[in-house]
Amino acid sequence: MVTPKRPPGWPLLVALTNGRSRVADDRLAAAVRGKVVMVTGSSYGIGEATAKRLARAGATVLLVARTADQLKVVADGIRADGGKAFDYPTNLADTASIEQLVAGVLADHGHVDVLVSNAGKSIRRSVADSYQRFHDIERTNSVNYLGPAKLVLELLPSMRERRSGHIVNVSTAGVRTPPMARWSAYLASKSAFDVWLRCVSQEVRNDGVTTSTVYMGLVHTRMSSPTPLLNQLPGLSPEQAADQVCAAVANKPHNITPPFVRPADALGNLLRVPTDRLLEQYFRRTDKPKRKS
């Protein structure tokens, strides 16, 4: 991915819009040294950067993703740097694979102290282009909602029995801001898991299991690169995003939210109709209707 040239002051703009949450190395080490941390979607991007930083801090990192070859590359790199990493290739859209994953992990390590639910599928497609593609909605929900929920359900019994566990949901700022055209499948699936986990957290907190949600702003990764507009906006690097995830792991806040989200959320609720109309006009201006053959 080619990084476009940025104007002066770009880092400050990125910080003002996406936040600067970062945990000190010694604080992170105190929180995770000797702990077993599972990171999903850890073969690339945010997950890879998060796994590497957690391993440097002394955690035993369990790498989970579909791409077995790349997952092994990440694990080998962590071990070469003196860290502890184990790779578990898994299709999180398949419930049987998730059951097999958790059974293997508990047999190998006894427990999981922290789950970083980071794996996700992004999709940007208008409804007109989705008429014959309902499978896109099904796949997006499988990766962003149903799979993560199944994984939490498999891990919760052992966490509650030990009266210890922390779950970090790497969500998106789009869950908290006014909905935008073309992002219906993606935002709906991420919103579903966000609300599901928040409900579950009320039931398990008394058993020593806590949750944090990172409403991640824009991150320049393989996932965002196909959308030209996003490449022009101020966004985090995977390493900066990993800093926010690690802050959630160490400090266990209820949520980490970019500075722009709360005012956007408030305005979107107060001015819902005008906001919808404004975004509708943007869609109309940028829509490219298909030519009739």
Image (spheres, rainbow, N blue to C red):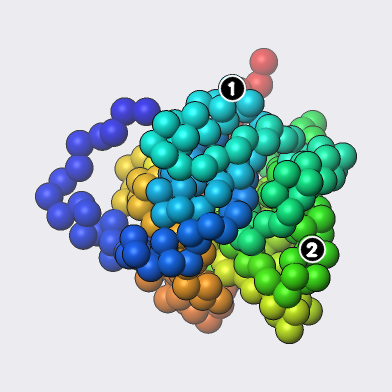
Q: Residue at x 66, y 21 (%)?
A: 292
Kind of residue at disc 2? Ser
- Kindly identify which residue carries mark 2: 158
Q: Secondary structure at mark 1?
A: helix
Q: Residue 126 location, x and y as percent?
A: 63, 41
Give neighbour class at mark 2: few <14, some 14-19, many 20+ (Cα, 10 Å).
some
Give neighbour class at mark 1: few <14, some 14-19, many 20+ (Cα, 10 Å).
few
Q: Residue at x 34, y 64 (%)?
A: 26
Q: Residue 276 location, x and y as percent?
A: 56, 64
Instruction: Give the number of the disc on residue 221.
Output: none
Say if residue 41 shows up in the picture.
no
21, above or below 237, in the image: below
The residues tagged by marks 2 and 1 sit, at their Cα atoms, a distance apart of 30 Å
Q: Nearer the viewer, mark 2 or mark 1?
A: 2
Counting residues from the start of the chain, the first of labels 2 and 1 encountered is 1
246, above or below 284, in the image: below
Q: Compare residues 140 and 177 and report the one nearer the observer.
A: 140
Q: Residue 206 location, x and y as percent?
A: 73, 84
Q: Residue 74 location, x and y as percent?
A: 49, 32
Q: Which residue in the rendered view is the most extreme toward the bottom? A: 206
Q: Compare residues 275 and 57 and report the one nearer the observer.
A: 57
Q: What is the quadrant of the N terminus in the image?
A: top left
Q: What is the quadrant of the C terminus in the image?
A: top right
Kind of residue at disc 1? Asp
In the image: residue 144, left or right of residue 100: left
90, above or below 185, in the image: above
- Kindly identify which residue carries mark 1: 69
